[in-house]
Amino acid sequence: MRVALYLTGKMEKQILGFIDRNLSGLERLKGLYSADFLFLENPRDPSHGDISTNIAFRLAKPLKINPAELAKEIAKALTGALASSPLKSTIDAVEPLNGFINIRLSAGALRQVLKDIRSGKEKFGHNDSGKGKKIQVEFVSANPTGTLSVAHARQAAFGDSLANIIKANGFDVTREYYINDEGVQITILGQSIYARYRQEIGDQYEFPENGYKGEYIKEMAEEFRKEHGDKYKAGSAEDLKVFSVWGCHYLLKEIRQELLDFGVKFDVWFSQKALGASGKIEKTLGLLKDKGLLYEAEGALWFKSTQFGDDKDRVLKKSDGTYTYVTPDIAYHKDKFERGFSRVIDILGPDHHGYINRIKAAVQALGYPADAVSIIIIQLATLYKNGQPVKMSTRAGEYITLREVLDEVGKDAARFFFLMRKANAHLDFDLELAKKQTPENPVYYVQYAHARICSILALSKLPDNDIAGADLELLGAPEELSLFKELRQFPPSVKLAAQELDPYRIITYLQELAACFHKFYEANKVISDDAELSRARLYLVSCVKQTLANGLTLLGVSCPAKM
């Protein structure tokens, strides 16, 4: 039996047991039905009820019967059994519809979610399905050759929110940033800073053709000269290394601060240079060699990645003796698993599609299952201002940075907007919309629902203990029932967001809950002359407030009390 909806533990067992007992007792299903076939979920159309099962579809084929006819027969049997069941006050109706069997819960059963929210508080929606298993989420991992771009910003919002969601599902999560602090790009960074340094001194020095041309390189050269004067003017090989190391450290400091201002804090900053110095790359190659998975051809060392589903074998060491970029990545993933992670998640940009097969092949070659690594490709985001796309060019240094987006719209709007499309979809980010203090701004719309409830609770002047004693039986208006049903969707939304590895489901949920609350508010007075009804409605809106806060917190977005 599986459940993909929210039911309290006691209610879940009662309903599952009721359905199972009665299906097991149907003569027609003897020898065919098994509890393993039973799956409960939310109906696709909320108007169809609160619980749905497709059991009739699963059993109709071996019985050679129309699923709709079997659904009618099962629904009739369950309805008959309900009359003498303790669940008759929990279940209002069992209805067949086009082969599905839909169950409508009573208002009393739906109200139970309010008590669960009040008792669960900030943990409502969380579960322990992860059982403390260790998961690593590696994201951003931008080369420290410039400040973070909009593409990195989307990856940061996605990765950090996903880590929050996975943790809410009972996993032990580590956020990690892989620092590419050696190699060709870092060498070019040093050469670029050196060229601007010489120009800062007043020399006619040619800038490297493939150098980083952004204004930030000039600023770095100025800062370097302030610290070191003209000491490194000669530009020896050792001098250039100094520029590379200094530049890498300088930009890493900038990146760390930008991420902190964006609400992203990493548990581990893993250095590629340190990985190389540790000897782990050579040990990894030795392991692959012992397994017979390496061979030499054309003066290079190759990995037999096609044995594990890759489209072609990969070069690990070139004919000049240097490693290709995939080689340290393989050693890095070996190190991840050796640190005890049962699963690792790599969040990468759209230029890394070819990376998927080779890393999955490497993970299997190292002795781990293919599904122990998940690689998520985040598509690009296009910024719009006044209806026009903002142009950017990384090599020329003309790109919109995370810092500029933060300065323009703030952390909350930036994080929310970067999550408003699924990872595999291109994102259009309207900067002007993100700044609007109106309901058409999605993040404002959700946060305003939270702030409005804070104002209502403050206006009531009722202590929380008084609200906690409210008579919830007084709640039954259509808009109140809709809120009960919407609140019940939060725990399965958190679970599904982790299973799908995408925070987008939480975004859509919060928008729907906010819309449901605003509709309730427009149709009903929360505080009225009826003191007891007012208390009950204050109880209800306090639960909406808690659920909005829990969802926004998963996204790293603040929960304002005033707006």
Image: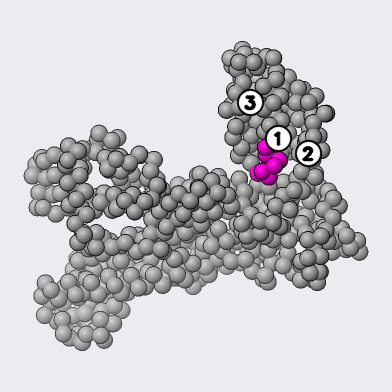
In this orientation, which residue lies closer to the viewer: 211 or 367?
367
Amino acid at circle 1: Ile
Q: Is residue 382 visible?
A: no
Secondary structure, magenta segment, majority class = helix
Residue 526 location, quadrant: bottom right
381 to 288, vertically: above or below: below
Q: Which residues are magenta?
A: 6-15
For the residues labelled 3 and 1, the Cα–Cα distance comes to: 15 Å
Question: Closer to the N terminus: mark 2 or mark 1?
Answer: 1
Percent x, y of residue 511 = 64, 54
On whether residue 373 falls in the magenta region, the answer is no
Residue bearing the label numbered 3: 55
Q: CA distance from mark 3 to mark 2?
A: 21 Å
Q: Is residue 298 left or right of residue 157?
A: left
Mark 2 touching mark 1, by CB under 8 A? yes
For the point 61% across and 12% down, the residue is: 64
Residue 98 percent location from the top left of the image: 69, 25
Residue 195 lies, with reference to residue 66, above or below; the image says below
- Note whether 381 is above or below 57 in the view shown: below
Most distant residue in the top direction? 64
- Can residue 5 be seen at all in this image of the molecule? yes
Question: What mark, if any, has residue 90 been given in the picture?
Answer: 2
Q: Nearer the viewer, mark 3 or mark 1?
A: 1
Numbered label attached to residue 15: 1
User: Judging from the image, what secondary structure is the residue with disc 3 in?
Assistant: helix
- In this view of the protein, which residue sits in the foreground, 234 or 485? 485
Measure how far apart labels 2 and 1 are at the Cα level: 9 Å
Residue at the (85%, 61%) spot, across then down: 534
Q: Residue furthest right?
A: 529
